[in-house]
Amino acid sequence: MANQKMIYFVSLSSYVPYVLREALKMKEENNEVSLFFDLDGARVLDKRYLKSMERTHNMDLASLFNKAADAGIPLYGCQMNVLIAGGLELIDGAELAGVATFLDQAYKADAVLTY
């Protein structure tokens, strides 16, 4: 399944460690991978959250995010999440994006996986 375009849409923070591992594996197989985080899933892109949850599900989230950034996997947080109390202090390598960005990439993808 190499050379596929995969979009991961993450709305629950509890799935993030598994999605990151899967995305890294897909990237190693020469697939194009993007990750979009919305709702509860977007809070993992917040530096404050990441500090409080350094390890979850026996995985080091900061390390997984660093590996994803090093692999060139784009990390997008929903721009609407800046409206939640305190906004988001994005981790390095993450950026805010809207629905138009997601849809543009999703229409060109071979698969959109939601978690």
Image (tube, rainbow, N blue to C red):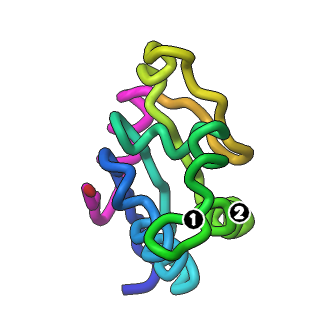
Q: Residues within 10 Å of mark 2 (few under 14, many from 20)?
A: some
- Please provide percent x and percent y for residue 90: 65, 35
How many angstroms separate mark 2 from mark 1 (CA)?
Answer: 14 Å
Quarter of the picture containing the C terminus is bottom left
Magenta stretch, residue numbers: 98-114
- Can you say whether 80 is above or below 45 in the image? above
Q: Amino acid at mark 2?
A: Asn
- Please provide percent x and percent y for residue 94: 63, 43
Q: Amino acid at mark 1?
A: Arg
Is residue 93 or residue 57 the one in the foreground?
Answer: 57
Q: Quadrant of residue 8?
A: bottom left
- Please provide percent x and percent y for residue 86: 56, 16
- Which residue appears at 61% of the width and 36% of the height? 95
Residue 95 tag number? none
Quarter of the picture containing the N terminus is bottom left
- Give the left or right position of residue 112, taking residue 104 as reference: left
- Which residue appears at 66% of the width and 47% of the height? 51
- Can you say whether 4 is above or below 107 in the image? below
Residue that mark 2 sits on: 66
- Please provide percent x and percent y for residue 77: 50, 36
Is residue 59 or residue 78 the one in the foreground?
Answer: 59
Q: Quadrant of residue 2?
A: bottom left
Residue that mark 1 sits on: 55
- Which residue appears at 50% of the width and 76% of the height? 58
Work out whether mark 2 precedes mark 1 in sequence or the reverse, and give the earlier one. Answer: 1
Q: Is residue 108 magenta?
A: yes
Badge count: 2
Q: Farthest residue to the front: give it.
A: 52
- Can you say whether 75 is above or below 67 in the image? above
Q: Is residue 31 magenta?
A: no
- Can you say whether 83 is above or below 109 in the image? above
Badge 1 marks a residue whose secondary structure is strand
